[in-house]
Image (cartoon, grey):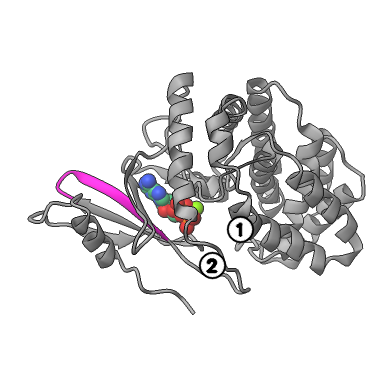
Amino acid sequence: MPDTTFTPEAAIDHLRAQGVVPPDADATARSLGGGVSNHVHQVTWDDDCLVVKRPLPNLAVEDDWPADVERVHNEAAAIRAYDAILRDAAVEARVPRVVSETHEPDHVVAIECAPDGATMWKTDLLDGRVDAGVAAAVGEVLGVVHDAASTDDDVRERFASKRPFEQLRVDPYHRTTAERHPDVADAIHAEIDRLLDTSRTLVHGDYSPKNVLVDPDGAVPWILDFEVAHWGDPAFDTAFMLNHLYIKSIYNHGQHAAYADAADRFWTAYDDAVDWDIERETVAELAVLMLARVDGKSPVEYVTRDAVADALRRVAKRTLRGDAETLPEFAALARDEADAL
Ligand SMILES: Nc1ncnc2c1ncn2[C@@H]1O[C@H](COP(=O)(O)OP(=O)(O)O)[C@@H](O)[C@H]1O
Ligand SMILES: [Mg+2]
C-alpha cells in the first residue's frame, strides 16, 4: 500500500509549524518523487527553497521491505559530517545544509535546495552524456571523506549502528540475492561476513549517480541521500558507484567505452585520495551488488531486456567464482559481455 499521508501541502504546513515558512508567505510545494524510501517534497516561497524529507516505514518496492523511520536523523548527522570535512578539505563539492529536524510526532528533515537547473547525474548518464570529469570529482569527494572520517572518533561513535545498513542494504540486496541464487550463495555469504566485519570509516551507503546532482554552472557535484550512512567498509561505497557505471556500460553497450572510462576515472581519483588499497574488496562487493541490482529486492528499473539482465548475471557470477579479482579483470568481463550484445 502506498503511504499517502505526507502530501506536498503537509510539507508546507510542517515548515509553517516550525516557523521556517513565515505565516504570511505564499508557499507552493511539489513532490520530487523518485525515491522509494521517502516522501521528498520541494517547498518554495519568496526567494527561498527547501526540500522536506520524511521516511516511509515500508519501502515502495514490490517485495516487503520495512525500515526504521529514525534513519532520517542518521541522514542529518551524516550531512553535517560531510559538510565539515568538505569545507576543511576545500573540495569543490556540496551537501545541502540542514535547516530543520524534528523527532516527534514526525521524523522529518528540511534541507537546502540544490541550485535551479541542477541535473541528476543518473539522467545524464542514461541519456548517454557521460562526463568523466564528474566521475573523477565524485571519486575524489568520496576518497577525501573516507580518508578524513577514518580518524574521527566522534564520527565513529555517532555512526556505530549498522542497523540502517542491514535493513536497507544487506537484507534486501545481499541476503535476498543469496536466497535467489543458491549456486553462488556461499560466496555471497563470505562477502557479507567480510563486509560486516570491516569497520574503517564513514560509509555513505547510497553513493550512486541518482544521489549526485550536477550544478549547471560547472562540475560542482551536490551529494545527497545519507540515510544509510554508517561506520563500516569503504569498499561498499566504491563498489556501489562502480556498479551503476558498469551496469550502464552493459545496458547502453554502444557507448560501453565511455562508461568504462568514467569508472576508471572515478576509481583513480578515489584511490589517489586515500591511504589504503581496497581494490580487491571493491571487486568482491561489486560482484554481489551487480547480481543484487538484477535479482534483489530493488532491481534497477531500466534493465528490462533479458539479454542485458543475463549478461549482468554472468559478469557477477564469474567474478564471484574467482574469474576477476582486480578492476581491470572485472572491466574485461564487462567489456566482453557488452561486445557480445
Ligand atoms: N537538496 C535537494 N535539492 C534538490 N533536489 C533534491 C534535494 N534532495 C533531494 N532532491 C531530489 O529528490 C530526489 C529524492 O531525494 P533523496 O534524498 O535521494 O531521497 P530517497 O532516499 O527517497 O532517494 C533526489 O534524487 C533528487 O532528485
Ligand atoms: Mg535518493
Q: Residue furthest bottom?
A: 1
Residue topped by disc 1: 168
Q: Main secondary structure of the magenta part?
A: strand
Residue at position x 46%, y 44% in the image: 224
Residue topped by disc 2: 59
Residue at position x 17%, y 43% in the image: 47
Residue at position x 38%, y 74% in the image: 4
Up-down relation of residue 114 to residue 168 (above or below): above
Which residue type does callout 2 highlight?
Leu
N-term-proximal mark, 2 vs 1: 2
Q: Which residues are magenta?
A: 45-54
Image coords of residue 228 (percent x, y) = 56, 50
Image coords of residue 229 (percent x, y) = 56, 45
Q: Name the quadrant containing residue 324.
A: top right
Which residue type does callout 1 highlight?
Leu
| Drawn side of residue 42 relative to residue 13, left or right | right
